[in-house]
Image (tube, rainbow, N blue to C red):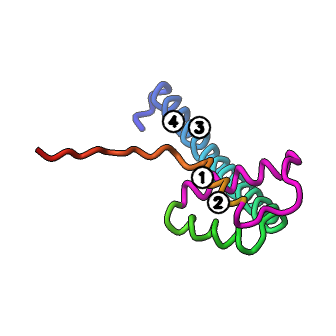
């Protein structure tokens, strides 16, 4: 540099700030990994609950819904898991009960009346 003490001090502060930013970026990467791992554990736990409380027919129906409407199926899975964990499910959910649950959770469909003149 030019030898000016202010310039040297400024450069020193810049380097220190860059190091802090790099350290933070490294920590954020670790947090993201921890979050991803926690999410995977939660999904595995949810799948275990679903296997325990759903019959084969109900699971097949839910899988069919998941193929066409993944977001809706995710909502249904969360609902089933929360019902099971709160103790509001007696026995296992069969295909008929799954159909009823899907009807309850299904968003209202809009109907359109088309009139021709």
Residue 5: image location, x then y, percent: 50, 26
- Picture residue at 52% right of the left edge, 45% below the top: 107
- Picture residue at 53% right of the left edge, 69% below the top: 67
- The reply, left or right, for residue 9 in relation to residue 85 is left
Reply above or below: 79 against 98.
above
Reply above or below: 61 against 74.
below
Reply above or below: 51 against 79.
below
Q: Which residue is mark 4?
A: 14
Q: CA distance from mark 3 to mark 2?
A: 61 Å
- The reply, left or right, for residue 23 in relation to residue 9 is right
Secondary structure at numbered mark 3? helix
The reply to whether discs 3 and 2 touch (Cβ–Cβ < 8 Å) is no
Q: Earlier in the sequence, mark 4 or mark 1?
A: 4
Q: CA distance from mark 2 to mark 1?
A: 6 Å
Q: CA distance from mark 4 to mark 1?
A: 60 Å
- Which mark lies nearer to you, 4 or 1? 1
- The reply, left or right, for residue 56 in relation to residue 110 is right
The reply to whether discs 2 and 1 touch (Cβ–Cβ < 8 Å) is yes
Q: Which residue is mark 3?
A: 16
Q: CA distance from mark 4 to mark 3?
A: 5 Å
- The reply, left or right, for residue 77 in relation to residue 50 is left
The reply to whether discs 4 and 3 touch (Cβ–Cβ < 8 Å) is yes
Q: Which residue is mark 1?
A: 103
Reply above or below: 44 against 29.
below
Residue 37: image location, x then y, percent: 73, 59
Secondary structure at numbered mark 1? helix
Viewport quadrant of the C terminus:
top left
């Amino acid at each position: 540099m030019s030898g000016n003490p202010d310039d040297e001090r400024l450069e020193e502060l810049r380097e220190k700030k860059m190091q802090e930013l790099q350290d933070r970026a490294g920590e954020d990467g670790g947090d993201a990994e921890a979050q991803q791992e926690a999410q995977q554990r939660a999904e595995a736990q949810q799948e275990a609950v679903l296997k325990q409380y759903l019959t084969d027919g109900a699971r097949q129906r839910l899988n069919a819904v998941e193929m066409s409407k993944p977001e809706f199926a995710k909502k249904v899975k969360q609902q089933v898991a929360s019902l099971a964990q709160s103790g509001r499910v007696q026995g296992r959910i069969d295909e008929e009960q799954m159909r009823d649950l899907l009807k309850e959770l299904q968003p209202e469909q809009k109907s359109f009346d088309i009139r021709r003149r």
